[in-house]
Amino acid sequence: MRLSQLLESDRLRAPAREIPVMLRTQVLVCGGGPAGTAAAIAAARLGVSVTLIERYNHLGGLATGGLVIILPPLTDEGRPIVGGIGLHMRDTLMQDGKAAPRGHEDACWFDPEALKALSVRMCVEAGVDLLHHAWLSDTIVQDGSVRGVVFESKAGTQAALADVVVDTTGDGDVLAWAGCDFEKTDQAIGLDFRLGGVDVELWHTARQTNPDVCTAVLAEVRKTCDWGGPFQISALPSSPGLAWGNNGLRVGDALDPRELSTIDVQARLKIPQALEILRQKMPGFADAWLIDTASQTGVRRSRRLRGVDRLTDEQVAQYDFRHPQAVGRGNDYRRQGIAYDIPYGTLVPESIDGLVTAGRCISCDDGALEPIREIQVCWVTGEAAGTAAALAARGNLRPRDLPITDLQATLREASVAFAD
Ligand SMILES: Cc1cc2nc3c(=O)[nH]c(=O)nc-3n(C[C@H](O)[C@H](O)[C@H](O)COP(=O)(O)OP(=O)(O)OC[C@H]3O[C@@H](n4cnc5c(N)ncnc54)[C@H](O)[C@@H]3O)c2cc1C
């Protein structure tokens, strides 16, 4: 590119160029978090060709790279909520000793490395083509339908074409570039971390006998380090001496790289500072050391699709919200006694074709996002979106025209939980 000819004030005029098509597939899954992993496995198991594009070198998204390591319950007072791929993943982690029960019901802690390995193994066994180290940068739309994506990598700019594309980027990148309407909200962004060398027994005893001291130390960390959002430390029963720091530094725009960089820099400066206070003042932390900080910055929310349907806060707060077009069920990590159907229309854009979404960018209001963005619900919407994409690709149908009874029957066969 000869910049002297292309520079116009503060904007570059990009010359027209040909972008090589690297691959063609029936279903293209964009983003390998919990939703994308489930989508890719579900689609590939139905016999269509599937490629999953991911910018980092692992699967699991925030659940693994973000060190978000609590899995909420998959049942509600005995009612099955999450079945299918999500239930299989949780049960496998438990059987392998890579997850440990947490509190009541069937919530658990899990080992993020074990979930990375399990996610890859299940993708490989299902026949998913994994393309890592590729950053999606644009969506190809023709005649109102998504035809593929453009991505950047060390190999330059390339394109991938598909019959159906699944947006599981979490931030709704693909749907936004396709021209779909979306909503967006910001929430505290943080950088989770793990500590080793914690005398958990001493710490737990101190919390029982002298809770005010422990609370005061955490308050001092927040104040001294100017921590704008939550700052919690929990022991990890999956490994002795391990503790987890879940936090939010401040509310920020997850789509602004400057903002994300500032949060990263601040977090990496503040976490050692926080550790020093813990070492000096928190019982059981005298020998604590920083094992790692998350490789993926902790973005809780950003864009959400405006879909054919939209789940609301009121609907997801019900004991048993039912919808005739359900493609799975969700619950709420904050309270038992909640189970709601997730309508297919929350995964399908209002106008654009060739695209479905899953995970934390599905169509819902701000309040409904809080339970929907949890890992177990992202597995549910991912499995539904991948199944829908495969059936649409196989039948040469637009996702919006898929007979809902076919989709529901296929999901039931895959042991996805539906209301009785
Ligand atoms: C600090 C924090 C604490 C949390 N605590 C919990 C908890 O305790 N329990 C719980 O269940 N949930 C928790 N969550 C929420 C949960 O982890 C996420 O909402 C969930 O992982 C979302 O899954 P997803 O698949 O929709 O998106 P993500 O996990 O965000 O995955 C999206 C994937 O797409 C990839 N991607 C994105 N954009 C591009 C692009 N342009 N090109 C290529 N690849 C791209 C990303 O690298 C990533 O792998 C927490 C979240 C945060 C931030």
Image: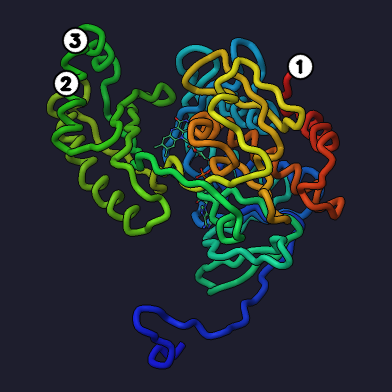
Kindly tell me whether residue 122 is visible in this rendering.
no
Disc number for residue 210: 3
Indicate which label's residue lies in the foreground, 3 or 1.
1
Kindly tell me whether residue 244 is visible in this rendering.
yes
Residue type (three-letter) at the residue carrying disc 3? Asn
Vertical side of 299 occupied by 178: above or below: below
Residue position marked by numbered label 2 in the rendering: 216
The residue lying at 47 percent from left, 25 percent from top is 109
Percent across and percent down for residue 235 are 34, 23
Residue position marked by numbered label 1 in the rendering: 420
- For the residue carrying disc 2, how many other residues have a C-alpha within 10 Å: few (<14), some (14-19), or many (20+)? few
The secondary structure type at the circle numbered 2 is helix
Which of the 4 quarters of the picture holds residue 326?
top right
Q: Is 69 in front, or is 388?
A: 388
- For the residue carrying disc 1, how many other residues have a C-alpha within 10 Å: few (<14), some (14-19), or many (20+)? few
Indicate which label's residue lies in the foreground, 3 or 2.
2
Residue type (three-letter) at the residue carrying disc 1? Asp
Q: Is 284 in front, or is 369?
A: 369
The secondary structure type at the circle numbered 3 is loop
Measure how far apart labels 3 and 1 are at the Cα level: 48 Å
The residue lying at 58 percent from left, 47 percent from top is 305
